[in-house]
Image (tube, rainbow, N blue to C red):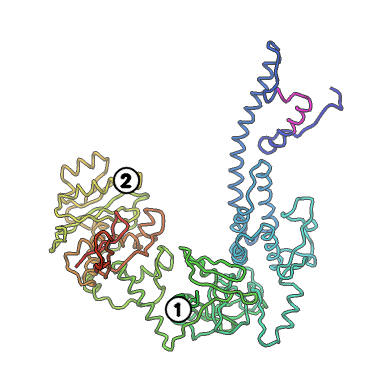
Amino acid sequence: MAQEDKLFIDKLEGVKNWQVWKYQMQVILEARELWGHVDGTATSPALSESSSSSSSAQTAFEKAQKKTRVLLVTSINSDLQKFFSLKMKDCDSLDDHLRRMKEITDQLAAIKAPIPEDEHIVALLLSLPRSYNTLTTALTAKGDELSLTQVHQALMSEEEKRGLYKGKDGGDRVDKGETALQHEKTSRKPIKCFGCGEENHVIRNCPKRKKGQHENRNKPGNSYKHKATPADADGKRNEDSGGNVFVVGLIAAEGNSCWIIDSGASQHMTANRDLLVNYCEFPEPEPVALGDGRSVNAYGYGQVDITMILGNKEKDQRKSILTKVLYVPKLATNLFSARAAASKGKVVQFGHTLCWIKDSKGQVVARGRLVGNMYRLDCKVNKHGNRTSIANETGAKLDLWHQRMAHLNAGQMKIMASKELITGTDIPGTGKLSVCEPCAEGKAHRAPFKPAGEIKSTRRLELVHSDVAGPMKTESFGGAKYFVTFIDDYSRCVTVYPMKYKSEVLEKFKEWEAAVTNQAECKIKTLQTDNGGEYTSTEFQDFLKEKGIRHETTVPHSPQQNGVAERMNRTLQEAALSMILHAGLSKAFWAEAVCNAAYVRNRVITTATAVTPYERWYGKKPDVSNLRVFGCTAYAHVPDASRQKLDQKAVKMRFVGYSLTQKGYRLYEE
């Protein structure tokens, strides 16, 4: 072969350059009319010696292609894992971090597995350190309008603002401005100002913006806005201020009557101390950094009683309470924090002229209007001459949830609300319970049980506790005098079965065992009980052997060894008695009340678990919006088929529990 006929291609290095190498080989072989021997389309003479070589060439190429596909999938998975696990530290260079991300995206694009731009944006924002949270919130508020280029420009502007990225007048540049945002042989695009739209400066140094501020600052009625930057108590720059250094903007607006929706503020803030109730003062003033270099102090926090205006009619007004509102005396206006609303499960959406705040179900709970360049919240503050008004309201709301949650103590309710361990509730974080006489009468005892021990199991149904309570002095409406509980040690979920006789324990255990093993898709390993005859009978032992369940019993006269079940039964009985006394119902409702207490117990935290038993069992937070006060008045709708004209359409009844097999409540007609 002549020297001029020789063609040189890249050496095959596996997955890294397979696509390029394959394309080059195909072009060369097609040029030499040899590609047909590889893809199998070439026709060979019947007894040609080349037929076997052609077939082997095709087979070899197909094997290589099949093997490479497997390697490609492995490589893609590895690169994707690297991409989405990248994390940037505060001490890292943004330029290096973006370059690392670009290298991975280039590798994926080379093997025809590009990452979509929206996923790239999400991965980039999630990889940033916490010090970028304010910028991240502002960027995500743009929604679908956000592009990767905008994110890159915003990040560069932020780093330049922090002094970590040196600009034209900031000293040495890296490779003549080359960054990870461009190809290796191209220079970085000029930075674009978000304020005036011109290049080569950021909004903080915008000459038009500074000129406008200087002209308007001394004019009455004009408003101006400074973008916040981190600062310490002395007003100096501080990259990692820590503690409660809240980043806000100082807006000269309409004084204390106006609330501005701020996507950068980490908390709601006000300068009007008179609006705050349940006020708590900070041990020391907390610095709040302002964009003009000054630092003012927040002296405490409280609650603000506010009414959201959703329309022109009175029915379109929604009363609400803003919690953890900072008191910042030198703030020019009130700030409604979009971040604080989002942390409570709300969704904040910004439009061209309107802003909507929606709850988890998509219902609009507040709105704002664009006034100038700011979104003003449509609301009115409810001022109280007596500051105990909201305190009384929060106390009443706490009392209501106390009754709904089977007379649970206030501490556990507040913990669940503050840590968002449940959904569908508006339990206030402050306030005190009123004296609950049913609790005092139903829960009084000489000495408390020992606190619940640590969870010994590592998975569901590894250990199950059980105990029988009774006989009760009063039979239930169904004739029950006992109840048995089955408690999963890992989740502390409890199931209650009322019984007429103790001998029904085996029947109830079989029913429960079939249900939970089907749910958990695993078998019960150990059952822990006392030495009661209902558990040690021959029939019960035979069933345990059949299912391969190990049986642990307590030492005679040592009920504390079965403490989990003993405590649970006592807790359920006390809660049931408190509910019956509060509702003024007959003690014949004890079975309904115990089942109601168990239902609630599975949806509240315990001393043994940091989350609710429901979440440990099902893997999701419980929605408690359906909880009602035991014994409260309810009206059951009468179906059309069951009534005639002029007949009442609803029947007055009493609420006595929740149906586990139907989507509805258990009601009793007096």
Of label 2 and label 1, which has the lower sequence position? 1
Question: Where is 421 relative to 77, above or below?
Answer: below
Give the CA distance from mark 2 to mark 1.
53 Å
Which residues, given as a range, are shown in magenta? 24-36
Question: Where is 94 relative to 317, above or below?
Answer: above
Relative image position of residue 549 (x, y in whole percent)? 27, 43
Q: Is residue 31 magenta?
A: yes
Binning the other alpha carbons within 10 Å of mark 1 as few (below 14), some (14 to 19) or many (20 upward) gives few
Question: Where is 523 relative to 315, above or below?
Answer: above
- Drawn side of residue 459 relative to residue 39, left or right: left
Nearer the observer, disc 2 or disc 1?
1
Q: Main secondary structure of the magenta part?
A: helix
Q: Quadrant of the N terminus?
A: top right
**Do the CB atoms of the residues marked 2 and 1 lie less than 8 Å apart?**
no
Relative image position of residue 169 (x, y in whole percent)? 80, 67
- Drawn side of residue 150 relative to residue 141, left or right: right
Relative image position of residue 227 (x, y in whole percent)? 65, 74
Q: Amino acid at mark 1?
A: Glu
Q: Amino acid at mark 2?
A: Thr
Closest to the observer, 447 or 434:
434
Relative image position of residue 43 (x, y in whole percent)? 70, 18
Residue drawn 25% across and 66% down?
A: 645
Task: Tell me the tag on residue 396.
Answer: none
Q: Quadrant of the C terminus?
A: bottom left
Residue drawn 61% across and 35% down?
A: 69
Q: Is residue 626 magenta?
A: no
- In terms of secondary structure, where does tag 2 sit? helix
- In terms of secondary structure, where does tag 1 sit? helix
Residue drawn 54% across and 83% down?
A: 257
- Drawn side of residue 276 relative to residue 290, left or right: left
Task: Tell me the tag on residue 314.
Answer: 1
Task: Tell me the tag on residue 517.
Answer: 2
